């Protein structure tokens, strides 16, 4: 029995297999209003037809100033709920679960006149210098995540993922490379964790489904967070009842990253066993056998597939064929699936 095609339950959400579509920005809101377009329907629904177990929508901005680009999806206004709900309902027709990645770009917002960060340090010479957030600004952002999660619940999402990776705002608070504050949000790792903690606590008050957190579990810099720091953060997230840690890496400061198949799996595996929390592996996982190895060896509980699912919406079928697993067809494709 292929573990890749066995169901798994997180809180009140059971997904039919372990294949998760990794959140990927599509830069496709045509009026810069953050609203769902026909492209998003084609893009996400085709992966549901392709039997992905869980689709996590791209980084979706919890406030306008938190967009990575002006074309990002948004969930900062009640006006966003209707389009998202229609799309969620359509995906559910294919027995695929659906989540949304809640994000704030912080100093990595590309198209905003004023950008925010824990400390006034630009990412590199191509980015503006951010404004240091004051406590009132931090409180507004925590509130924005809460309201976004409330809208996600109204739109019918099964889960939410908090984007604390890739050098976006929450990651900027977590990392000593970008957080030079000397108040209760900076300094030691407990303080650097405070923004994420406060966001999780607020999101939990309005969203009853499972909450995943994506982290960059390696910063590729000698003065960055260490493995021990990530184990500390993951332990705290477990105490906060987070359902899964999605283990990515990088993006907090410019760095050269040596990538290879499964290059982020090692830390995912360590965090899973040290902290005893479910984890998701991501990064150049491209075949059924490779995904199966990760799951059977208990290195992760799910695999998140990014670019392979861009190249092939039917990646799940390809992986099933490689593993000789008789994957059910969507009803419409029954006559031509095998
Ligand atoms: C991404 N990635 C990404 N990650 C994330 O957490 N939120 C996002 O919105 C995006 N956006 C995005 C857009 C595009 C076009 C790509 C290719 C990637 C990273 C993605 O989720 C995944 O972690 C990486 O692509 C590594 O997995 P693969 O592609 O090697 O399977």
Image (tube, rainbow, N blue to C red):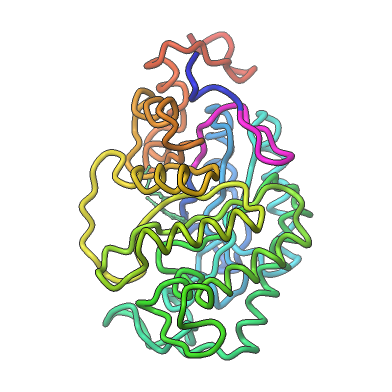
The residue positioned 53% from the left and 89% from the top of the image is 183
**Residue occupying image coordinates x 55% and y 41%:** 42
- Judged left or right of residue 131, residue 40 is right
Q: Nearer the viewer, residue 246 or 79?
A: 246
Tell me residue 216's x, y (percent): 41, 59
Instruction: Give the side of residue 114 with respect to residue 13, left or right.
Output: left
Percent x, y of residue 233: 50, 62
In this picture, residue 210 sits left or right of residue 295: right
* Prevailing secondary structure of the magenta residues: strand
Closer to the camera, 214 or 100? Answer: 214
What is the x, y in percent for residue 107? 43, 78
Q: Residue at x 50, y 41 (%)?
A: 21
Q: Is residue 211 magenta?
A: no
Determine the image quadrant of residue 151: bottom right
Q: Position of residue 103 (x, y in %)?
A: 55, 64
Q: Is residue 10 above or below residue 117?
A: above
Depicted 259 relative to depicted 230: above or below = above
Residue at image x 27%, y 39%? 261
Q: Which residues are magenta?
A: 8-21
Q: State how many labels appear.
A: 0
| Residue in the foreground of this view, choosing between 148 and 84 | 148
Query: Relative to 203, does residue 306 appear above or below in the rendering?
Result: above
């Amino acid at each position: 029995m292929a573990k890749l095609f066995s169901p798994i339950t997180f809180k009140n959400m059971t997904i039919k297999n372990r294949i998760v579509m990794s959140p990927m920005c599509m830069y496709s809101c045509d009026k810069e209003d953050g609203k769902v377009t026909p492209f998003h329907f084609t893009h996400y629904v085709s992966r549901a037809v392709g039997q992905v177990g869980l689709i996590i929508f791209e980084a979706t901005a919890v406030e306008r100033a938190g967009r990575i680009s002006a074309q990002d999806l948004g969930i900062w206004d009640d006006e966003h709920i209707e389009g998202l709900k229609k799309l969620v309902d359509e995906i559910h027709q294919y027995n695929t679960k659906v989540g949304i990645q809640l994000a704030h770009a912080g100093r990595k917002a590309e198209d905003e006149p004023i950008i925010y960060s824990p400390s006034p340090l630009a990412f590199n010479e191509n980015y503006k210098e951010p404004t240091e957030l004051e406590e009132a600004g931090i409180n507004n952002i925590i509130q924005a995540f809460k309201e976004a999660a409330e809208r996600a619940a109204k739109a019918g999402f099964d889960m939410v993922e908090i984007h604390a990776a890739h050098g976006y705002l929450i990651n900027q608070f977590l990392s000593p490379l970008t957080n030079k504050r000397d108040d209760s949000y900076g300094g030691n790792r407990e303080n650097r964790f405070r923004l994420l903690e406060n966001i999780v606590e607020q999101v939990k008050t309005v969203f009853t489904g499972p909450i995943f957190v994506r982290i960059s579990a390696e910063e590729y810099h000698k003065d960055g967070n260490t493995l021990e720091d990530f184990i500390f953060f993951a332990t705290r997230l477990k105490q906060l009842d987070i359902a899964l840690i999605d283990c990515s890496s990088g993006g907090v400061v410019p760095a050269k990253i040596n990538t290879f198949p499964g290059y982020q799996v090692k830390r995912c595996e360590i965090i899973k066993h040290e902290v005893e929390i479910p984890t998701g592996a991501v990064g150049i996982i491209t075949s059924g056998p490779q995904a199966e190895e990760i799951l059977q060896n208990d290195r992760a509980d799910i695999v998140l597939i990014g670019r392979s699912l861009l190249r092939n919406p039917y990646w799940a079928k390809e992986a099933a064929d490689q593993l000789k697993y008789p994957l059910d067809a969507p009803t419409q494709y029954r006559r031509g699936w095998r």
